[in-house]
Image (cartoon, rainbow, N blue to C red):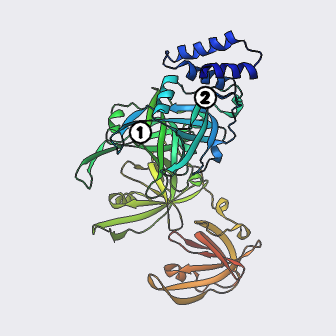
Amino acid sequence: MSSTEDIVKKILALKPQLTREAVERLIAEERAKAGNLLTEEAAAHLVASNLGLDGTGERIEAKVRIGDLTSGLGDVSLTGRVIHVFPSHTFSRNDNTEGKVLRMLLGDSTGSVAVVFWDEKADHVVASKIEPGKIVRILHGYTRERRGEIEVNMGGRGQIYMEPMDAVEENFPGIDTYFKTPGEIHSPGTVNLEGVVVDRFPVSTFNRRDGSEGKVTRLTLEEGGARINLVLWDERTDEVEDMAMGTKLRLIGGSARKRDGGGIEVHTNYGTVIKVLEVGVEPLVPVSKWTKIGDLSNGMFNVNVAGRVAQISEERSFNRRDGSAGRVASVLLEDETGTVRLSLWDDDVDLKDEMEIGSTIAVENGYTRESLGSVGLNAGGNSQIKINPEDVEVGEVRVEDKIVEIQDLREGQTNVYVRGRILEAPQVREVETARGPATVASFRIDDTTGEARVSVWRELVKEVEGLNMGALVRIENCQVRPPFEGIIQVSSGMFTRIVVEEK
């Protein structure tokens, strides 16, 4: 009795509602779909899998969810929707024999995973003409970690079955759900990404340590109310050389990485697939033209911010690690939602001579990073700084709206406004700091909601010396420190200003 006959008899025994003719017709159809590249026995296996059975007539069970996979599992069976089938390729082993490998990306409601098929298993997938969107079941795979990601490998015992009839569609979301927008990528790892090209950087060349020349370029993708940079290396740069703005891309198997200064960018690698979905489109959920200062966070790129000048610092010179000289100055910007420090570097420092308190400043394609304990705004080589542009408006900012009650102060807050009556005359003393000796004045204030200990440094000391108990003072742009002896502390910073409202 042939193996095919064994499978047919098992199917008929477990599925008595079917006739032999019906089973044989299903086998013939499977062979035809594969271009007659499958044997009758292989086609019979496929029919059995479609009926929820394996080739021996036993019920197929695949209890492992993709989100529960860990490295080192020796017998893994799972079901998933095909997200993508990567082309197979051949390679030479150490014994000079030729091997073949094919990767398939599967997903269920808990996540996605790459499944790797070797040699004749890869041939079987190719012959089966599996397309994205289909549900498949794999049996007897094993897991391992590769480049920090879990993958499932199909060895000698491994089997794959197409479209098992007992699979519940609701457990396997549609393909689109496995692709993230730029606003949903927050941590390193392998990612599938969709977005619309809104900016393209020139290709740059560089020399590697081995003397070879490399190439790199970047695209800015926008969707989901956020943007992210896509970094392409070497021959991948040719794929986007003539790519137009408004091209919607689907990226499969990219690598999300942390970039210097914070934030995430996505890199292509040898296996990354880039598909053009549409041309001449706008993001469905675009980035707001202007981001409110209160919505800024660490690691944002290509961000547009407008605010009014609240304070301007003095220019400071410094030496870089390579020995070159640099210049920096800071401008405190504010809108109705908050404040942020804008750092001006080198030639941009000269712009502060064109600014005054109350000027409107617009920063286009800026970036943020954490510095001095708070999020700061920076302008890079691709950024523009405009002073008092006619087409930009900033909401009115009233001092009263900035005042924070002492009971609401929290450690780590920056550029805070507080107001209170002095409970004791300021005490002035000399202290040693990392920057050398300094003068500090300390006193306590009360605003009826609570009490705070205030420390003001250096030139601000003169502004509080001689103030008596009961004076009403407003401390602008101070920093909130950890409580000491149960009392919250505030300290002066770069932009702090003392205003005496009542003596």
Name the amino acid, label 1. Asp
Asked if residue 289 shows in the view, the reply is no
Q: Earlier in the sequence, mark 2 or mark 1?
A: 2
Q: Secondary structure at mark 1?
A: strand
Q: Which residue is mark 2?
A: 161
Q: Residue at x 61, y 84 (%)?
A: 442
Q: Position of residue 482 (x, y in %)?
A: 64, 75
Q: Position of residue 469 (x, y in %)?
A: 69, 84
**Image: 181 above or below 328:** above
Q: Position of residue 353 (x, y in %)?
A: 38, 60
Location of the C terminus (image quadrant): bottom right
Local crowd at mark 2 within 10 Å, few (<14), some, or many (≥20)? Answer: many
Q: Residue at x 53, y 59 (%)?
A: 340
Q: Residue at x 46, y 53 (%)?
A: 367
The circle drawn on residue 199 is 1
User: How far apart are the alpha carbons under marks 2 and 1?
Assistant: 43 Å
The quarter of the displayed image where residue 402 is located: bottom right
Name the amino acid, label 2. Tyr
Location of the N terminus (image quadrant): top right
Local crowd at mark 1 within 10 Å, few (<14), some, or many (≥20)? Answer: some
Residue nearest the viewer, comparing 3 with 415: 3
Asked if residue 178 shows in the view, the reply is yes
The circle drawn on residue 482 is none
